[in-house]
Structure formats: C-alpha cells, structure tokens
Amino acid sequence: MPRVLIAAGVFHLLFGVWANFWPNLYFDWIGCDRPNHPMLWRGVGLLSAAFGCGFLIASRSPVRHWPLVLMGFLKFNFVIISFITIRIDGPLPYQILGLVVIDDLLWWFPFAAMLWAAAEAHAGRPPSGDPPLTLEEAGQQYHLSTGVTLGAAAKDQVLVLVFLRHFGCTFTRKILRELEDLKREADRHGARLVLVHMLSPGGEKQYLDGKGNIARIADPMCELYRAFDLGKGGFLELFGPRVWLPLIIALFRGCGIGHVAGDGLQLPGAFLFHDNDILAAQRAKTQADLPDLPALFEGLPEPENTESVPA
C-alpha cells in the first residue's frame, strides 16, 4: 500500500507541474483545440498536485490515513462518471479517454483495495489464508507506543502482554479500571506491562482515561493476536453461561457496555514474553476470562532486587 500511494503521489505532483508549466502541450499532442481558459487547466493541475501531497502523507500509514485514500478514490469516481456522462450527452474527443485512464481509472482498483484493507483493519479482521507470524517476526514488526520494537523491549526485560478485547467490551473496561493494580503486580516481579489493542495507533488514548504512561501495541489486523494463538469466540465463548455471572458482577460495579471498538469476536489473553519466547500464557476460553498476574508469574523465580523497578 505505501508503494502504491507513493507512486500515485509522485504521478499527481508531476501532472500538476506539467499542467501548469505546459498547459497546452497535451491538447497539441492529441490534436484537440487548446482550452479557451488555460487558467482552468492550471487549476486542475494544482488540484492534482494537492492530491499528490495527500497521497504521499497517506503512504506513511495507509490504514491510519484512510480518509486521504478515500478522497482520492472519490476523485477518481467523479472524473470517470463525469467522462461517461459527458460522452453520452454530447461529443467529447476519445483522445481524452487516455488521460482519464492514466489519471483515474488506473488508480481506481488499488485504491479500492486499500480502502477495503483499511475497513478490515478497523474491524480487526486478519487477512484470510495468511499463516500467522512467528514470535520472532512479530518481535521485529511490531512496535510499542514508545517506538521500540517488541523484540528489543523483551530482550532484557520480561513483558506482561495483556491482549484486550474491543474497547466497548465490559471486561475490557474492567481491565482498564484495574490497570494500576496490574502494573503494580508486573513491577513487583521486575516486568513491564504492555497492552495490546485492535485500534490504529493513537486510537486507544481516548479509552485510557489518563493512563497513557502504560506502553501499548496497536494491532488493527489482529496479526499479533494470531501469532500468540489467540482465536475468535463463538456463541458459547461470548454469551454462554460461564459469561453471565461475571458480566452481571462487572455491570453491577459500573463497568458498563460501550460501542464495539475492535473485533467483537476476538478473545483476550495474557502472556509473559521474554527474548522471543513465551514464558507463561493465559489464553481466554471465554470473553469473561481476565488476566490473573499472580497465577501467571507462579513458578517463575522472584527477582533478586525488587527495590529498583524498571519504568
């Protein structure tokens, strides 16, 4: 996706330069009359350059900057539909079709694919048929909110990875209310608490309620969830009898229910992760299974010095 957006950005910028410095050249090439208002053609060139800048910005994170991709997609549709409509209603040189193909139709399909990928990312659906990442690959590809890779962060320190369900889930809201307790338990063992969520980077901040000092990992495609063998829940895992009592208790304590912000089928989990290896795992069997850090650390040796705790 970034390569397509870079190519589209460079093309539209060059088109903008061409249309402004040589406004009559294209019409001379195709043997059409020059436009009566060359400033209008230059305006089209400036608009194209503006789209080019937007595509280059979107190439940094296509999923996060999907509105810029959508604007380009809408522009392609507008030009294509306008060409067809004008051609039906009156004469229009077929030579113009070449420009429509190069400037709009050529980009329609990759931009449509990028928008579909962005929609799947925001829904938390992984690419179908792709094998899960290995833990080493995941450690290299995923970054904490501090900028360091997962693998580097877990090199010298044990990470407590807490994989969340969507942010509207009652049990996720319960976890977020108890974050300080989870962090204290992780600190007591000399480990570092890291939250894994299914939103785009930065989208989780509105749900943390001032607890942004805890490191996070954004996994909108759920590839990291799959790498740690966390699956999707069926009816019993999400709404079965084992969920009823914990749900009633959590609601009674004011955790509430919010809108689905992530994949509503994804099950949570908690792991001790160190040097590309899982030391201990708690893979939820229902959505009501919450991280139990004392049990997770059970069997691991206590840190020799608990007075100095890594940040």
Image (cartoon, grey):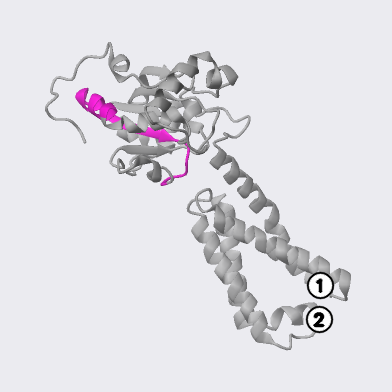
Q: What residue type is labelled 1?
A: Gln
- Identify the residue at image location x=18%, y=20%: 303
Q: What residue type is labelled 2?
A: Gly
Span of residues in magenta: 181-202
The front one of 2 and 80 is 80
The earlier-in-sequence mark between 1 and 2 is 2
- Identify the residue at image location x=29%, y=27%: 182
In the drawing, does residue 294 fall left or right of residue 282? left
The front one of 222 and 242 is 242
- How far from the left and from the top, in percent, is residue 30? 79, 77
Label 1 to label 2, Cα distance in Å? 9 Å
Per the image, is 189 magenta? Answer: yes
Per the image, is 26 magenta? Answer: no
The front one of 26 and 91 is 91
Q: Quadrant of residue 116?
A: top right
Q: Is mark 1 on a helix, strand or loop?
A: loop
- Identify the residue at image location x=53%, y=63%: 54
Q: How crowded is mark 2: few (under 14 residues within 10 Å), some or many (20 or more)?
A: few
The residue pinned by badge 1 equals: 95
The residue pinned by badge 2 equals: 31
As displayed, is residue 301 above or below residue 220?
A: above
